[in-house]
Image: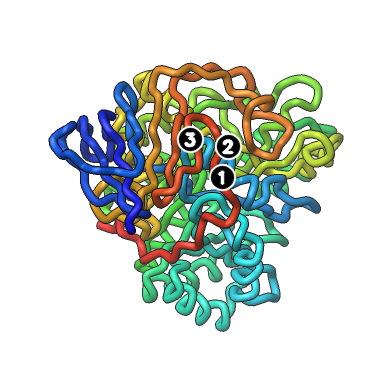
Amino acid sequence: MNRRTVIRGGLVITASDEIHADVLIEDSRIVAVAAPDSQHWSADRTIDAPGKYVIPGGVDAHTHMELPFGGTFASDTFETGTRAAAWGGTTTIVDFAVQSVGRTLREGLDTWHAKAEGNCAIDYAFHMIVSDVNQETLKEMDLLVEEGVTSFKQFMAYPGVFYSDDGQILRAMQRSAENGGLIMMHAENGIAIDVLVEQALARGETDPRYHGEVRKALLEAEATHRAIRLAQVAGAPLYVVHVSAMEAVAELARARDEGLNVFGETCPQYLFLSTDNLAEPGFEGAKYVCSTPLRPREHQARLWQGLRTNDLQVVSTDHCPFCFTGQKELGRGDFSKIPNGLPGVENRMDLLHQAVVDGHISRRRWIEIACATPARMFGLYPKKGTITPGADADVVIYDPHAEQVMSAETHHMNVDYSAYEGKRVTGRVETVLSRGHIVIDQREYTGHAGHGVFTPRSTCQYLT
């Protein structure tokens, strides 16, 4: 027998519509959306949502659970990280499996499947980090696309670790042009940055704030420009991750004005934090070390503008948490040894709702950049990212009036600080359904590890 759930009386918000409606769910799927009280649906469970928003579960297309980095590991496991995501109204993550140099893509993907399987509270998918481009790797890319791993990340940064040179990047782009994969690019000129790091340390500039100073905005813009032109030569689409600099946004806008399939993602840390945080006294700035780095505050307005004009299409978190004690502290006396990454998977939906309250974006744009477009960009739509008959019943009941103060005391991420400590925001997740299963019930966690399943993806659905 089908289990039926009705969500009554809420304001249903998708990327395209805002309507007061009732939503009928059978088992794991949404089966109907109708005018309030127009249908006398029988149900096993009724969720009353007057005065609340009924929104699609968030799709965070950029997370790093259990990522090895700088001699340590990201502090969130797939279990703790996906539970925290659910608390924040995110019901799907796309995490990055890593190919180690000298190993195959398959080995990397199998390793990540083993980490995630049976441990996730919400559904998950994978991108593949390509660290070693060779003929075998290129063939494997075709096989992964067939398996539903349809995007590949390359790095113009981190020489000696993940770095690919222009020739390797071009080969991977040419392959993705043939197999339908989407190349995701970490666009920073890592070769030049390493020179600036070495020079800064030689001058005794060792504090966290110098991390932002050596990773210059111009070197993000230069790499973004180069990635765009390589993609153009290859005839391939391009998705630039964690765009932080106004000069990089300008490169994306120019390419899009030329009609190229070039896309950009930014993250909450670039919209709400700045180099002021990196410069916090003592060693506190280490909490905010990530790459691309936080920029001076004046960059924020250009990022918000890019989100409004669709020169930036997606807000993901790049969630990659390291505890301050024992992990970030590895870089005391040498900023280049601070593990790069911030916690944020639990905060994204609330911070973007605050952006609605602050007038930066509309309610529908909130859902577009946090749910619908990431789902379309990475081949999950309309299964994920919207509320429509046939979609997975990934649904959030959101209280737009509740106030909260973000804090490490109350968050559920497995990390000992909050990047947004003390920030007051309006809006809070109340109830979360993942494939029809209630995982957060009136601010109580009712989910469990193993509910979330691997979700194969089709190719990018956002190409012009």
Nearer to us in this view, 421 or 157:
421
Q: Identify the mark at residue 2; answer none if there is no mark.
A: none
Q: Is residue 90 above or below residue 298?
A: below
Q: Identify the mark at residue 318; answer none if there is no mark.
A: 1
Q: Seen in the image, is 52 located left or right of residue 206? A: left
Q: Quadrant of residue 254?
A: top left
Give SS at disc 3.
loop
Query: Do the residues under discs 2 and 1 have CB atoms within 8 angstroms?
Result: yes
The C terminus: image quadrant:
bottom left
Q: Seen in the image, is 417 located left or right of residue 405? A: right
- Give the x, y percent position of residue 388: 25, 48
- Reading the image, the residue beneath label 3 is 441
Crowding near the residue tagged with mark 1, few <14, some 14–19, many ≥20 C-alpha atoms within 10 Å: many
Specify the amino acid type for callout 2.
Gly
Q: Seen in the image, is 71 located left or right of residue 110? A: right
Give SS at disc 1.
loop
- Reading the image, the residue beneath label 2 is 344
- Give the x, y percent position of residue 110: 62, 71
Specify the amino acid type for callout 3.
Asp
- Give the x, y percent position of residue 343: 63, 38
The N terminus: image quadrant:
bottom left
- Give the x, y percent position of residue 326: 84, 39
**Closer to the eye: label 2 or 1:** 2
Specify the amino acid type for callout 1.
Asp
Q: Seen in the image, is 230 located left or right of residue 10? A: right
* Whole-number angstrom distance, CA of label 2 to CA of label 1: 8 Å
Residue at the location (51% across, 50% down)? 122
Crowding near the residue tagged with mark 3, few <14, some 14–19, many ≥20 C-alpha atoms within 10 Å: some
Q: Which badge, 3 or 2, comes first in the chain's sequence?
A: 2
Residue at the location (45% across, 34% down)? 349
